[in-house]
Image (cartoon, helix red, strand yellow):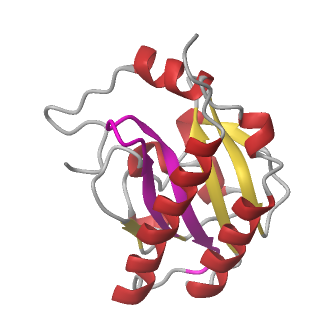
């Protein structure tokens, strides 16, 4: 699957996503120290100043865990992670100023001046995309090494396992 919400055949059932997100206690997840350890390790692994665990809600992107920023959320329409979560693999944006999806994005043209982005999708076992684990830099880069890309994928799977521990079962 392409990491492009305009790709032919791209379709996401937002009602299913909303129900799945509601089944998780996002406030409790935001207090999970393991998630912040994961973002800290992702930042170190990728030599990036910022790493995030995000959940993409209907109108916003919630930053559930974070290293290198105090932001708690952004509007969904400026989220890079909304593209990552619909893909099957790590999405890499070497220089956001050169990518037509992001060149005019206020997170690129203004603070924090994102240039490099790499993210791995966070997807439930039944295929519902929730968000991503991503790393961000304010300088452009060539990309990730194979080990860094593999590490982001493994860490995103660990994030999903943490999410599953906090999932409420239907009554």
**25 with respect to 118 (left or right):** right
Question: Which residue is most to the left?
Answer: 8
Q: Which residue is drawn at 73% across and 71% down?
A: 37
51 inside magenta stretch:
no
* Residue 5 image point, x, y percent: 31, 38
The front one of 171 and 113 is 171
Query: Magenta span: helix, strand or loop, mainly?
Result: strand
* Residue 167 image point, x, y percent: 60, 33
Q: Is residue 57 above or below residue 102?
A: above
Q: Which residue is drawn at 73% across and 44% down?
A: 29
Residue 155 visible in the displayed image:
yes
Q: Is residue 30 above or below residue 26?
A: below
* Residue 1 image point, x, y percent: 19, 48
* Residue 32 image point, x, y percent: 78, 53
Residue 111 visible in the displayed image:
no
Q: Residue at x 30, y 61 (%)?
A: 89
Boundaries of the magenta span: 117-139
* Figure quadrant of residue 92: bottom left
């Amino acid at each position: 699957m392409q990491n492009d919400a305009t790709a032919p055949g791209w379709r996401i059932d937002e009602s299913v996503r909303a129900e799945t997100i509601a089944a998780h206690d996002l406030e409790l997840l935001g207090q999970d120290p393991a998630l912040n350890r994961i973002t800290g390790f992702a930042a170190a692994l990728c030599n990036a100043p910022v790493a995030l665990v995000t959940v993409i809600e209907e109108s916003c992107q919630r930053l559930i865990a974070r290293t290198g920023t105090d932001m708690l959320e952004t509007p969904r329409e400026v989220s890079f992670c909304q593209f990552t979560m619909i893909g099957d693999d790590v999405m890499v944006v070497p220089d956001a100023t050169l990518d037509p999806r992001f060149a005019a994005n206020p997170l690129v043209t203004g603070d924090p001046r994102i240039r490099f982005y790499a993210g791995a999708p966070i997807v439930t076992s039944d295929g519902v995309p929730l968000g991503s684990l991503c790393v961000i830099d304010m300088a452009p880069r060539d990309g990730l090494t194979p080990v860094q890309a593999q590490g982001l994928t493994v860490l995103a799977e660990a994030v999903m396992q943490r999410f599953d521990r906090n999932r409420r079962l239907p009554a």
